[in-house]
Amino acid sequence: MKIGVIGTARIAKKSVIPGMMGVKEIIPYAIAGRKKEKVEAFKEAYGFQKGYDSYDQLLEDQQLEAVYIPLPNGMHYEMVKKALSKGLHVICEKPLATSKEEVEDLFALAEKKGLVLQEAFAYRLSQIHQIVLEKIKNGSIGKLKYIQAHFTFPMSDSSNVRLSRELFGGATYDVGCYNVNLIRYLAQSEPIQILASGKVDTELKVDTESTAILTFENGVTGISHCSFDESFSNEYKIMGTDGRISIPLAFNAQGKVELLFESGSDVNKETYDITDNYQLEMKHFYDCVKGKTKQIVNKEDSVANAAVIDQILEQIGY
């Protein structure tokens, strides 16, 4: 499958394109960016056959079957819609769009065209979270009661796109969406109540942190905390009636990944050899396009996640 990459973002360079290159069925065929020198650098580094200094030019390439979109948040909706309209399968970085209504609109178009549209929550393909969910389901910690997810790091460069209101930056869109997606996934349910607080920068007009309490009908409570004003934290903990599980490095971890299982005063450390989830994500996307499997992050998941994000941002005054 020949795939095009629309944008030269760091996530593409650092993680997703290397992931593509680990999938023998995928050919990284074309790259597009606004700076010719960056496009040429990507071509040289990764062996793309074509380079374009216009996103629209790439979309006209008849050799393409699919595209990956790592553009800033505020550009996702328009570019995904353009790609789908050209008959291309799409995998797009999270958040897929900036409202539940936009996400629904994109999936309606994908369904009309008979195309695969996937929100790029690569972490969901990682074996470690599947292991945790299986432990919940088999009663290893008793009845699940509480999920706490943190994703924080310091962000001081005001010119960074993550802090652009025009491009729909902010901590919740950037990393809080991971927490929300994980909590919903592990709870295996949708929240019936959301209470959120946060800080919206008065000059930048984007949120620099948010904390949300998600209450589920099955008795589970989830807390999401994200921030651009704190030291790096990327972890989650779940608590049940009979034990606790924590993952010190939760999202996009690979190699040797630790899981801490606690019961009373007993603490057991389990170590798993985890495959690069970006490679797993791209193989999964390929399999979905070829009709070999069903999407893990599907329409219902993406729409529901967007609905929660909408409520959080509304409550904190974004």
Image (cartoon, rainbow, N blue to C red):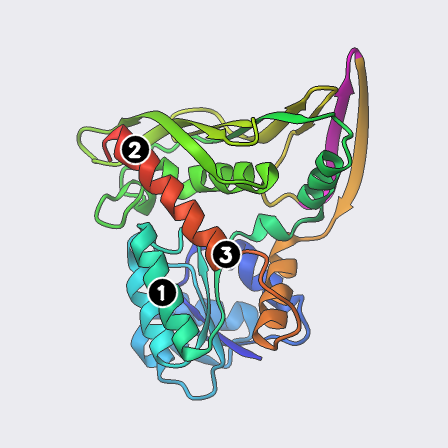
Comparing 249 with 37, the one in front is: 249
Mark 1 or mark 2: whose residue is earlier in sequence: 1
Q: Secondary structure at mark 1?
A: helix
In the displayed structure, 68 sits above or below 246; it is: below
Give the residue displayed 27% in from the left and 37% down from the top.
158
Position of residue 296 measured from the top left corner of the image (x, y, whole percent) = 59, 57
Residue 255 within the segment the image draws in magenta: yes
C-alpha separation, residue under disc 2 versus residue under disc 3: 22 Å
Q: Farthest bottom residue?
A: 62
From the image, state whether disc 1 or disc 2 is nearer to you.
Answer: 1
Report which residue position mark 2 lands on.
207
Q: Which residues are magenta?
A: 254-265
Q: Amino acid at mark 3?
A: Ala
The answer to whether marks 3 and 1 mark residues whose Cβ atoms lie closer than 8 Å is no
Query: Of discs 3 and 1, which sits in the foreground?
Result: 1
Residue 21 image offset from top left, x and y in percent: 62, 68
- Left or right: 212 with respect to 144? left
The amino acid marked with disc number 2 is Asp
Is residue 64 in view?
yes
- Badge 1 is on which residue? 106
Identify the residue at horizontal 72%, vertical 52% (top origin): 275
Give the residue type that dot 1 points to. Answer: Leu
Which is more N-terminal, label 3 or label 2?
3
**285 in magenta:** no
Whether pointer 2 and pointer 3 mark residues with C-beta atoms closer than 8 Å, the reply is: no
* Mark 2 burial class by Cα count in 10 Å: few <14, some 14-19, many 20+: many
Prevailing secondary structure of the magenta residues: strand
> Quadrant where the N terminus lies?
bottom right
What residue is shown with label 3?
120
162 is higher (above) or lower (below) than 242: below
